[in-house]
Amino acid sequence: MAFKALKPQTFYTLLALADRDRHGAGIRRQVRDLSQGTVQLWPAMLYSTLEELSDKAWIEELAGEAHPAGRSQRRRYYRITPQGRQVLAGQAEHLSRLAELARSRNPLSQEGGS
Amino acid sequence: MKSSRLRRIFRILVTLYPRSFRSKYFSEMDRLLEEEMQETPGSGWKTGVSILLDTLRHLPLSHIRSLRHPRRTPKEKKMAWTDDFVPALRTLLRHPAYSLTIILILALGIGANSAIFSLLDAVLLRPAPGVSQPERLVSLVKEDGRAFSYLDYRDLREAGIFEELSAGRRIELHLSEPQGNHRLDGELVTANYFSTLGAVPARGRFFSTQEDEDSPASRVAVISYRLWQNLFGADGALGRSILINENPYTVIGIASKGFRGTDLQSPPDLWVPMMRLPDFLMGMAGQALEQRGFNMFSIWGRLQPGRTLAQSRQRLQAAAADMDRIHPWPRGARQYRLDSLQYSAVPQRHREDVIRQGALLAAVAALVLAIACLNLANLVSLRAARRRRELALRSALGAGRTRLIGSLMMETALLAFTGGVLGLLMTYWSLPLLSSLQLPAALHPDLAVDLRVAGFGLLLTALTGLLFGLLPAWRASRPALMDTLKLGRGVERGSRIEPQRWIVVAQIALSVVLLTASGLLLRSLWNLSSVDLGFNPSRVLIAGFDLDLQGYDSRRGRLFMERLVKDLQAQPDVRTVSLSDDLPASGLLSKRRPVVFEGRENDPPISGIRQSVVSAGYFDTLEIPVLRGRGFDERDREASAPVAMVSQSLAERFWPGLDPIGQKVGLMGLEQWSEVVGVVRDHRHAGVREDTLGHVYWPLAQHYHSSLLESTRYLLLSCRSDPALLMPVVRDQMQALDPHLPLFEVGTLSERLYDGLAQERQSSAVLGAFAVLAVLLATFGLYSVTASAARRREHEIGVRMALGARPQDVLRLVFWQALLLVGLGLAAGLAGAFAAGRQLAHLLFGVQAFDPQTFAAVSVLLAAVTSAAVLLPAKGAARVDPVKTLKAE
């Protein structure tokens, strides 16, 4: 399968849902922490991404009764699907291979390359 | 960025997202936004901008694109305005030239109209500032037009008909300051004057009732805001002592900024208590306030709350009857009239002039807007015609008619709105220009684009957008579906003249009207400035002064004038020096007793004979030739035999066939005859517009006081060099004779004559500018109609050429068809111009409303310009390649 790099916001959103279910604002916070502030999911981007990932069935929205107790009923919670995990894992693997490749060629040394 | 504003913009942007997306996520997005703004209060605006940019960037383009194709569920047919907005915006952005043209055309039309509206609004519709409840203010006048005596005023005030009743009299006064001397307009008023008008001072206080008593302490003055700003540099004027007519006064108050008193045309600059009258009207001190025969005051009142004008009138009649019983009036019963003090910025007597001038401006602006609207309709319908295939296709795919009209309307509305906003901006920019326009009443209204003006502009925009967008849209949306789709490129049906051609005819007609009107005004301006005045105004320096206000008696005054003439005569470069009581071309008719002729003492008084009091050398200075007899000279002294001079036309009118020298003239009611010693050639004394009437001249030496109330004198000085160079010399000489005497109206006579034509110049300039605009718009309209007609007939032309027509045949075909429109427009326009010229008749001078030369010139000019506009597309049509056309079949 030809590899297609995910957009940063997609990758981070999947990553944010990898350990637990979260709602929109939670995803936004988690992504900001994971990326050390380099990726900001502003509302439009966040919900466009969530919509897109739901369409692809990489994540799913939890039905009302599955909400963790004590939380506001109005927030939508999202869970990563097995398919989504697969994509995430594939992506992570590919990225690490790329990283290894890059390290072996030592891009920072002047003599390297040709 | 404030978080409330951010959220509002955010909400608007979100409406561009698909409905399903919005209903699902909006509340959460909104909450997230709120939390975000609370979390980072410091870097608020940066976050805000990021959020908005992000919202824009993620606009689902596929969704917006889908809006253009009306495939939607019935529920979605209840569309949001955005469904039309975005595609309309895109369409317009794809045709920037078309959009910009329409926006500019509309902006010009709306801008011109709002500007004129702002002027008329300020001048005619808005009440004057600085007074409270102006609708309750009235002015009291006598039926015979005379003023009131002070004692009658006191009686009326006692009668208690009004809440407040005040009296006043306009005066001229001298204000002597270390920095310079000024002659100002002032007003003597009773202490309750300001409370009658309900005015509030900007600084200090107004007069107290104590100052209605005659005591030295009452040498106090209230100054206008303008005087405060101009003369005292807006610093502490309060409590300052100023020298008025050589008497020390204390400034106790400053009127509010817009306050104009009761004479709105030329508001006074200074008010002093009525009891100070002796300081200003020398020679009638005492009597003026104590005798019922001295009728010299105006009266204004404020109606009692809840009492109508009619009720107050009744009470006033009763009071007048009482006064007649106690103090009978020699001329019969007192007849008073009570008028509402029309408290708008224009005084009653100037309203008509202003309305006429305003109506002209408004009519012209409306014509330009009409042309602009026609252009708009033209362009919209042309574009709609070009898009017929697209519209037919959409209609075939199921778009309803309202849907099609909606999207066409949205485009027009967008254009109209942008044009309207730009037009209001233009209005804003044009206000300084408008303020400098001299209206007949010489008003200087404070112009501003306020809510009313903006509302007017936007209303116009909405109307034009609706009317001229809806009609073409309605027409274009009529789905001649099968025709259009079947015929492919769309062959024009028949030789029917489409509406846009009629529009062009109307445009040409309207611009012909404007062009002709401005041509007529230009010609009459030319006539006015080249009219033979009968005197030579070049190199004549003028300066006015008033010795009476400075407290001179006739002995001191004569001495002053003699020395002034002698001193100035000794200056190099001075040719002649003379004095007069008025200026040539001033247009003022002096208020003097009527002239009588010996042997006709019992004839009814002849009004309309002009009189001037002039010194020896006057006719030399103005180069008016003495035709018979002699001019005034040093023989004519106070004690010598009384003499007079007359104008040629007066001599011919009153002593036809007789020698005027030796005839006797006098003033009605004075037992003194003056012998005519000379006859001078006629000149236009009253101004360029007035035809020469008879004129009698009296020697200054024998008429020191020509009338009781006029004491202004003018110095007229003819120079060998540039008169401007002599101005400082004249000032120095005057200062040497009296350091406190102010000079006014200092300048050259030529300048003064030029200023006298300001109104004519402005009318032709404004009309001319509008006419050029109109011709440009009409030419553009003609060009676009011809070009698009030629384009649509490309196919037909190609076929014709394939069948043997030569390019020049095609050229002729297109050209003559367009010229037919020009001819129709021109004919209609000339007829309209004839009607308009009659309306302008009062502004014309030396030119008939139907002036063949002007009409011919306009026709030629218009024909030339429009031919050029037609020739370009016609040539393009002649270059059509028949092979290409046939291949396209």
Image: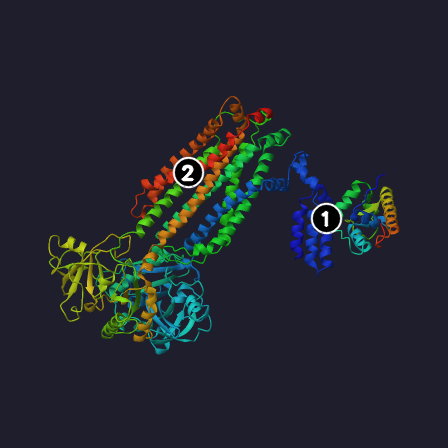
Q: Is residue B567 left or right of residue B631?
A: right
Tell me if residue B864 comes above or below residue B537 in the rendering. above
Q: Nearer the viewer, residue B774 or A108?
A: A108
Q: Chain of mark 2?
A: B
Q: Position of residue B875 (x, y in %)?
A: 49, 32
Q: Quadrant of residue B206?
A: bottom left
Tell me if residue B553 comes above or below residue B338 in the rendering. below
| Dot 2 crowding, Cα within 10 Å, few <14, some 14–19, many 20+ | few
Image quarter hosting the C terminus of chain B: top right
Q: Position of residue B681 (x, y in %)?
A: 20, 56
Q: Residue tagged by mark 2?
A: B864
Residue B351 in view, yes or no? no
Picture residue at 50% right of the left edge, 42% below the top: B464
> Of the numbered discs in the image, which one, if any, rests on residue A44?
1
Q: Amino acid at mark 2?
A: Ala
Q: Is residue B769 left or right of residue B32?
A: left
Q: Quadrant of residue B741?
A: bottom left
